[in-house]
Amino acid sequence: MSHPLFAPQSMYWRVNREWLISLAGPRALLLELAHPAIAAGVAQHSNYRGDPFGRLYRTMKTMTEISFGMPDERRDALKHFHKCHAQVRDRAFVVRPPSFVVYDARNSDLQFWVLATLIDSVLRVYEKFVAPMTFADKGAYYEDCKGLARVLGISRAAVPETYAAFERYVDAMVCGDALNVTQNARDIVDALFAPTLRGHLTRRFSFVGIGLLPPRVRQMYEYEWAAADENRLDHLAAIARRVRPKIPRALAIHPKAYSMEHRLQKFPSSHPS
């Protein structure tokens, strides 16, 4: 039977279908770019100055089709994903003298860090802005994400076995020497937050993501964050949690997920077995 990658009853679907999850995007991007090798790869293989939102849009579209699309949509999205990554391999370059890194977008450790920034950011935004999650909920969500990692071609050796191990992995990345905000990362973020109307709106939209960054990473980017900012973030989150249950489902969830749920209700045999 043809069916999407995840069932609507899965924790992954329940979490990622929420429109509010889009607030996780800036946090994930900033964490991703804090890895010097990834920032260098993006800087050298994307037109971030001429089209600062292009890569972000294409990434979101690809992940949506993989997550909520039918097999043909998922196949095309994965084909595009692997084709793009197969073309990206750099010479060794200096990250922090005297260290050298060879960037390869097919490197499972780098691929998993990108996915990990999404997993961690989505869970933090969902729990703060949508509804509380138990440790078991997070574990179920992570198990689904391990399936996504396999579909993306990430080596099992690069993927922590349990959610508890995943938490330790993220903590080690954030607290260790792996992350360092380089000039490449600053240039990419400056292009996104350029002094244009779109750049100003993007910066405002990124308020939540910046606020939810680990303080150490936020300091690397030299973002100021005062007690008043934290209070504002908490106030916005409280409003969102209070209002979300009152919003009609058709408006609260991603249209791709909504249409797929409607289709699966109409044709139950399309559910994953």
Image: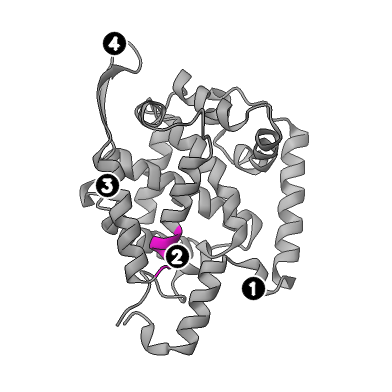
Asked whether disc 2 touches disc 1, contact meaning CB atoms under 8 Å apart, the reply is no
Q: Is residue 60 magenta?
A: no
Task: Give the amino acid at mark 2.
Answer: Tyr
Where is residue 57 shown, x and y percent of the image?
50, 47
Where is residue 153 shown, x and y percent of the image?
24, 52
Task: List the residue tagged with mark 2.
Answer: 12
Helix, strand or loop at mark 2: helix
Task: List the residue tagged with mark 4.
Answer: 98
- Lower position in the chain sequence, tag 4 or tag 2: 2
Extreme residue toward the top, this view: 98
- Residue 55 visible here: yes
Q: What range is drawn magenta here?
A: 64-69
> What's the CA distance linking mark 4 and mark 2?
41 Å
Task: List the residue tagged with mark 3.
Answer: 83
Task: List the residue tagged with mark 1.
Answer: 250
Task: Give the amino acid at mark 4.
Answer: Pro
Where is residue 156 shown, x and y percent of the image?
22, 52
- Count the marks: 4
> What's the CA distance linking mark 2 and mark 1?
18 Å
Q: Quadrant of the N terminus?
A: bottom left
Which color scheme did the rendering employ for the protein? one colour
Residue 81 higher or lower than 248, as above or below:
above
Q: Crowding near pointer 1: few (<14 within 10 Å), some, many (20+)?
A: few
